[in-house]
């Protein structure tokens, strides 16, 4: 199967023919879609502190998640492999569970200040004994992605934003991340993992859903 046939299915071809864009689609595929991570790709990826991750669940539904962390959140291991950490979340493990079962992922990197964006399609694995855990303090899991396709995207519809500061919840080597306020909500406290119960009590005990919504509205969640 050629790279063109691999990226475009009949559903894409039908719309391309209807829009008279089949030639353009093939030209763009030839020009920008690659199976290897170039130096330019790698510099852009490793400069980012966030990306969007898509996975597919057991029902065939896609899940899209925002993943944030320090600059260099995603590391280029070689010209076919990326790696990134999974930090403490809401305990649902939607993305990590999907990866463990299926492995197909999409990654969208956006620089909102330039603007610029890049896409990755690949197959991923997830592990909790990966030696790269030492590279990202606070990581629970490490995901490694074998890249199938990587390509830049036109950024003309990307709104330009200014980055103000990093989230205080991003784990740092010298300090533990702050405890998330939503884990103090009285409706969920009795379901928290044992490791979280003592911390929830230590920072002030329970809050109501109304109190949490007020914190959320003030940007203090």
Image (cartoon, rainbow, N blue to C red):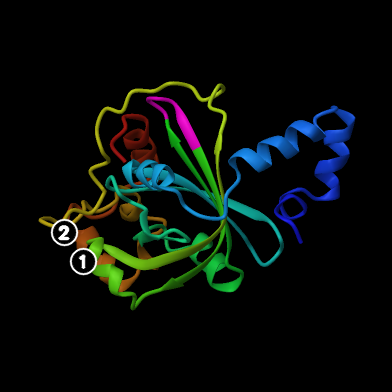
- Residue 144 in the image, given as x and y percentages of width and height: 44, 66
Asked if labels 2 and 1 touch by Cβ distance under 8 angstroms, the answer is yes
Q: What residue is drawn where x is 31% and y is 32%?
A: 219
Q: What residue is drawn where x is 80% and y is 43%?
A: 12
Front residue of this view, candidates 172 and 177: 172
Q: Which mark is residue 210?
A: none
Front residue of this view, candidates 120 and 143: 120
> What residue is shown with label 1?
198
Q: Quadrant of residue 193?
A: bottom left
Check the image and report above or below for 190 versus 20. below
Residue 113: in magenta span: yes
Most frequent secondary structure within the magenta stretch: loop
Q: Which mark is residue 202?
A: 2
Check the image and report above or below for 188 versus 34. below
Tell me which segment is drawn in magenta: 112-117
Quadrant where the C terminus lies?
top left
Q: Residues within 10 Å of mark 1 (few under 14, many from 20)?
A: few
Q: Quadrant of residue 41?
A: top left
């Amino acid at each position: 199967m050629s790279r063109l046939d691999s990226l475009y299915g009949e559903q894409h071809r039908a719309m391309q023919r209807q829009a008279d864009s089949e030639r353009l689609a093939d030209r763009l595929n030839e020009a920008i879609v690659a199976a290897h991570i170039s130096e330019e790709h790698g510099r852009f990826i490793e400069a980012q502190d966030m990306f969007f991750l898509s996975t597919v669940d057991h029902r065939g539904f896609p899940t899209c998640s925002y993943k944030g962390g320090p600059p260099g959140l995603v590391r280029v291991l070689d010209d076919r492999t990326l790696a990134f950490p999974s930090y403490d979340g809401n305990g649902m493990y939607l993305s990590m569970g999907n990866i463990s079962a299926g492995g197909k992922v999409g990654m969208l990197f956006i620089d909102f200040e330039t603007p610029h964006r890049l896409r990755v399609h690949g197959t991923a694995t997830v592990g909790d004994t990966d030696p790269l855990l030492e590279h990202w303090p606070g990581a629970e899991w490490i995901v490694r992605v074998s890249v199938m396709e990587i390509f830049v995207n036109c950024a003309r519809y990307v709104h330009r934003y200014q980055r103000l500061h990093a989230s205080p919840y991003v784990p740092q080597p010298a300090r533990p991340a702050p405890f998330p306020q939503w884990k103090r909500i009285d409706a969920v406290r009795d379901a928290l993992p044992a490791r979280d119960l003592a911390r929830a009590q230590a920072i002030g005990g329970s809050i109501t859903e109304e109190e949490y919504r007020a914190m959320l509205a003030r940007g203090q969640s």
